[in-house]
Image (spheres, rainbow, N blue to C red):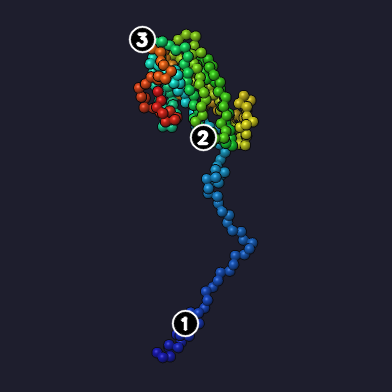
């Protein structure tokens, strides 16, 4: 036992005090991996360029009866989807029939077309009669609702038919990446066939002129008739008539 102890102590001294091995340094000629940009900006740069299908799926025209054309003899029924896109509107009018009937038009855009502007051009139609032009460019700050003004439909009618249809005949042109919206002329703009589409959605408005009814009293300027709630909302979150 006495002879074994010095031998064990010597073993510990020799092997216990040996310093740990230090790894060789990385040679200077070996490149380190580059850092991958996973920020939203970096991801957006890698996305595929927009095509005309993105335009068809993310823009929509909402057509609503203007407040100045409401009356006790006018009823409105609208149907909207989960994205507040109005899909169909029916306007029922009893006598006295108005001399003018105005509609507000809002362009709903759920995409950003900063680098690839979209040209919209066409006409508002009452049956086969044009009643207004559409000339618009979606460019910077396009992801929002755009007021397109008003359209008046009675100008297209010589008499009061049983019904008339307000619709849109519109074409969209997706311009090449890098096109500046400031230099675009909606009348003259052109692009390749695969970047053009007439499949742009809107809510057609069926206007029905029904039989004789009591004469409606005129409204004061600050008086707007209350209408039965429809359970639908427009793009601003307000109830649609």
**Identity of the residue furthest to the bottom in this view:** 2
Q: Residue under circle 2? A: 143
Q: Which one is earlier in the sequence, the residue at label 1 or at label 3? A: 1
Q: Residue under circle 3? A: 214
Of 221 and 115, which appears nearest the observer? 221
The image quarter containing residue 195 is top right
Looking at the rendered structure, the secondary structure element under dot 1 is: helix
Residue occupying the point 57% across, 27% down: 136
Q: Residue under circle 1? A: 12
Q: Quadrant of the N terminus?
A: bottom left
From where the camera sits, is residue 94 visible? no
Residue 117: percent from left, percent from top: 58, 33
Q: Which one is earlier in the sequence, the residue at label 3 or at label 2? A: 2
Indicate whether 109 appears above or below 43. above
- Residue contact between numbered discs 3 and 2, judged by CB atoms under 8 Å: no
- How many residues crowd mark 3 within 10 Å: few (<14), some (14–19), many (20+)? few
Looking at the rendered structure, the secondary structure element under dot 2 is: loop
- How many residues crowd mark 2 within 10 Å: few (<14), some (14–19), many (20+)? some
The image quarter containing residue 116 is top right
Frontmost of labels 1 and 3 is 3
Q: Quadrant of the C terminus?
A: top left
Question: How far, Cα to Cα, is label 1 from label 3?
Answer: 115 Å
Question: How far, Cα to Cα, is label 3 from label 2?
Answer: 46 Å
Residue occupying the point 51% across, 34% down: 143
């Amino acid at each position: 036992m006495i002879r074994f102890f010095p031998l064990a102590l010597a073993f510990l001294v020799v092997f216990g005090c040996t310093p740990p091995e230090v790894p060789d340094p990385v040679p200077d000629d070996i490149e380190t991996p580059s850092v991958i940009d996973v920020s939203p900006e970096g991801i957006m740069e890698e996305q595929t360029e927009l095509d005309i299908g993105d335009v068809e799926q993310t823009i929509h025209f909402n057509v609503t009866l203007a407040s100045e054309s409401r009356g006790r003899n006018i009823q409105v029924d609208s149907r909207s989807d989960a994205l507040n896109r109005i899909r169909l509107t029916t306007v029922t009018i009893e006598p006295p029939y108005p001399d003018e009937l105005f509609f507000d038009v809002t362009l709903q855009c759920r995409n950003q077309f900063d680098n690839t502007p979209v040209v919209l051009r066409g006409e508002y139609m009452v049956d086969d009669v044009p009643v207004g032009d559409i000339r618009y460019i979606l460019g910077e700050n396009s992801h929002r609702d755009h007021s397109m003004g008003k359209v008046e439909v009675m100008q297209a009618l010589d008499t009061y038919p049983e019904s008339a249809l307000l619709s849109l005949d519109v074409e969209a042109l997706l311009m090449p990446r890098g096109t500046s919206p400031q230099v675009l002329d909606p009348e003259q703009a052109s692009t390749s066939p695969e970047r053009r589409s007439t499949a742009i959605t809107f809510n057609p408005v069926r206007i029905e002129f029904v039989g004789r009814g009591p004469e409606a009293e005129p409204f004061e300027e600050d008086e707007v008739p209350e209408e039965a709630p429809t359970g639908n909302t427009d793009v601003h979150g307000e109830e649609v008539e």
